[in-house]
Image (cartoon, rainbow, N blue to C red):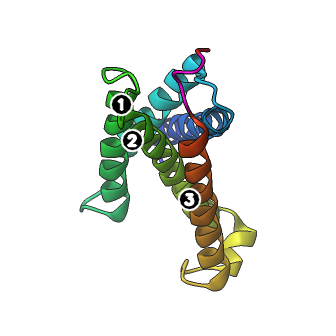
């Protein structure tokens, strides 16, 4: 790996981890009915940048990661439209919540994939990512984010308070 690609990879990983970390803060805010405007802008920005920078890696054909990046950008566009131009009014509240949680899930999904590819102990347990440890990790993440999404939709009522 040449030095430019190495720096680009580290930048992409750093942005991704910042997006994932801030995403959990934002989801906590949704569940506790707090807008967390600064955290939300940071989360949406870093998560968009994660998807966009993912397309900068060399590839000679369309890959599943490209499809996931496109899906993520569509979900993020919904979140941004719901949050800012539509100001969470009416159905845009739950559209925003579901889109934000889905965007976080997609980032976390990729984190699990990368962990099982790059961490030797995890790779040994699921070298082809079809083995039970990988499947269980992905299923657990899906269930967790589904439940977080339900709680967030129920609890987040931005008209009641502003932060």
Is residue 122 shown left or right of residue 95? right
Q: Eyeballing the image, is 22 above or below 132?
A: above
Q: What is the quadrant of the C terminus in the image?
A: top right
Q: Which mark is residue 133?
A: none
Q: Which mark is residue 95?
A: 2
Q: Are marks 2 and 1 in contact (CB under 8 Å)?
A: yes
SS category of the residue bearing label 3: helix
Task: Please give the name of the residue rendered at 70% of the width and 80% of the height, measured from the top-left corner.
Answer: 125
Task: Please give the name of the residue rendered at 58% of the width and 15% of the height, measured from the top-left corner.
Answer: 162
Q: Residues within 10 Å of mark 1 (few under 14, many from 20)?
A: many
The answer for how far apart the CA atoms under marks 3 and 1 are is 20 Å
Q: Residue furthest left?
A: 61
Name the quadrant containing residue 21: top right
> Which residue is identified by label 1?
82
Task: Estimate the x, y position of residue 66 in percent, counting from the top left.
Answer: 32, 55
Residue range in magenta is 157-161
């Amino acid at each position: 790996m040449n030095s430019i690609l190495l720096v680009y990879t580290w930048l992409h990983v750093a942005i991704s981890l910042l997006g994932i970390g801030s995403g959990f803060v934002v989801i906590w805010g949704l569940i506790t009915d707090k807008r967390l405007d600064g955290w939300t802008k940071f989360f949406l920005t870093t998560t968009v940048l994660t998807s966009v920078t993912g397309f900068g890696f060399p590839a000679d054909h369309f890959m599943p990661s490209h499809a996931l990046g496109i899906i993520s950008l569509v979900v993020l566009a919904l979140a941004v439209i719901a949050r800012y131009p539509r100001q969470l009014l009416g159905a845009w509240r739950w559209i925003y919540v579901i889109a934000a949680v889905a965007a976080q899930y997609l980032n976390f999904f990729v984190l699990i994939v990368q962990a099982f590819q790059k961490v030797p102990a995890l790779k040994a347990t699921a070298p082809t990512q079809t083995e039970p440890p990988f499947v269980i990790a992905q299923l657990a993440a899906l269930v967790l984010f589904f439940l977080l999404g339900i709680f967030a939709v129920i609890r987040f009522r931005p008209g009641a308070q502003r932060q």
